[in-house]
Image: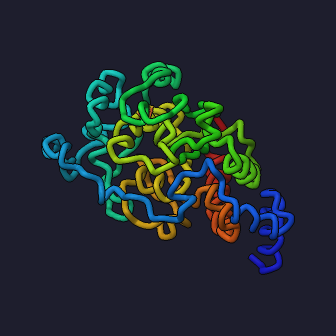
Amino acid sequence: MSTQYEVLEYLRYFRELGVEYIDAELEAFRTPDSSAPSSVRSGEIPPTISSFDLKPLASEIASVEKPKPGSRLKDIPSLASLSPQRTSKLEKNETAPSMQKEQVADKPQEPQTIRSTSETLDDIRADIGPDCSRCKLSTLGRRQVVNSTGNPNARLMFVGEAPGADEDEQGEPFVGRAGQLLTKIIESIGIERKDVFIGNINRCRPPKNRAPEPDETAACKPFLLREISVVRPKVIVVLGATAAQNLLETNVPIGKLRGRFHEYYGVKVMPTFHPAYLLRDPHKKREVWEDMKIVRDYLNSVANKDHWK
Ligand code: SF4
């Protein structure tokens, strides 16, 4: 690709993102988005899976057999095993078998795929309930549960960390300034926001936008995994270090995770920077554009093999 063409592509991308004046973007940097997760706003490295206290889960983890070499897919518990009946265990903050078997992103993985499931997004939402109290975030000032939204047949899914102030107030994910930027990012690759599916790993706003704690993530993440089983997207773009590390169960920094696909139960996962971080540091938009081009090209490459859902 020629340099000139690259420059034109960048210009188009920045125009899509509404970047007209660098000063305006720097102003956004001086006034961080109040709805941004704490880790994004502070620039701190969030807690990682490796720092989670797994002691309470030790016996459960020890009881799960590792797949033997040559195991067939049907022998490997899948996301579909997270049926509503399993939620009584999840309510105790135990980790689902499929999550225990997840591998660190950079390690060789057994081929695992998402099994089809008969449950619907409405079933999952009903299971969560409007007043979910499965983790302590229900008692720490959240206004409401913020469920995922979007096209149930989406080929592209976005996953963030947890709702911020605007999302907590409006009951929808990514509706604040960061959400508006996410819309522009989606549109920059020729897709409308209504055609994607958007959610968070945790559905309740943590106090002061702190990062969700391990027990909170363990309680809520299974619902997202069930949604992935229902939607079966071709690509998941996971936004920000905390969400990427939680989803992929790794402590690799976001700067090293981004820029390439990771496999997650047969779904391509592209980690990239959180839009709220881009509001603080507009220079990172270039990397996000590179990531989104990879996503766009992959979706285009499979479009001829698989119709748009
Ligand atoms: S964060 Fe998730 S598990 Fe915790 S109370 Fe909210 S909906 Fe329930």
Nearer the observer, 62 or 179? 179
Nearer the observer, 30 or 66? 30
Q: Position of residue 190 (x, y in %)?
A: 76, 50
Q: Residue at x 52, y 29 (%)?
A: 145
Q: Residue at x 46, y 24 (%)?
A: 124
Tell me if residue 173 can be seen: yes
Q: Is residue 308 above or below residue 46?
A: above
Q: Position of residue 27 (x, y in %)?
A: 76, 64
What colouring does the structure picture have?
Answer: rainbow
Q: Residue at x 56, y 49 (%)?
A: 235
Q: Position of residue 304 (x, y in %)?
A: 66, 47
Q: Position of residue 129 (x, y in %)?
A: 46, 21
Q: Residue at x 28, y 39 (%)?
A: 95
Q: Going by the picture, which residue comes out furthest to the bottom? A: 3
Of the four image quadrants, the one with ligand 1 is: top left
Judged left or right of residue 232, residue 286 is right
